[in-house]
Amino acid sequence: METHVKVLGALEIAMGVFMLLGALMIVLVFGVAADAVRVSDSPNTTIALPIIGITGMALVTFLLTLSLPGIIVGIGLLGLRPWARIAGIVLCILGMTMIPFGTIIGAYGLWVLFSRDTERLFAPPYAGPPPA
């Protein structure tokens, strides 16, 4: 089951990186759109520029808040950190709303992270009874 956890960690990191690339693309697209509106001679420029800026910032902020936890949890899963299992479960549940890839990775992640073998993998080692 350790292999499945490592694959899930790599998938979480990959999804996070793709979302970061998406945020970068949005910055570029909205920047070009703002420049195109700025150079136009339309009287509605003063109305359009703030709308473009606010919309672009909202989308970039949304993607960053989704991607950064995915990358952090992916790194934690690769290192078999105990906190990463719980955070991974939460991310997989939230990620299932991102059809189709988030749903596939979310279902796979829930199967992996709820497995008994995975629970044992993330459990702290037993140190024995306390000294008397």
Image (cartoon, rainbow, N blue to C red):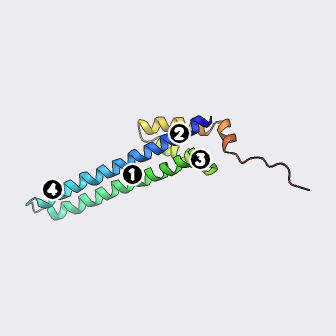
Q: State the separation of the CA atoms marked 3 and 4.
A: 46 Å
Q: What residue does disc 1 label?
A: 63
Q: The residue tagged with tag 1: helix, strand or loop?
A: helix
In x, y percent, where is residue 95? 47, 43
Labelled disc at residue 79: 3
Neighbourhood count class around disc 1 (C-alpha, 10 Å): few under 14, some 14–19, many 20 upward: many
Would you identify the image quadrant in which residue 48 lies? bottom left
Identify the residue shown where x is 61% and y is 51%. 83
Residue type at the position of mark 1: Leu
Residue wearing tag 2: 8
* Residue at x-position 48% and y-position 37%: 105
Q: Secondary structure at mark 3?
A: loop
Mark pair 2, 4: CA separation? 42 Å
Of the residues tagged 3 and 4, which is closer to the observer? Answer: 3
Earlier-in-chain disc, 3 versus 4? 4
Question: Which residue appears at 15% of the width and 58% of the height?
Answer: 37
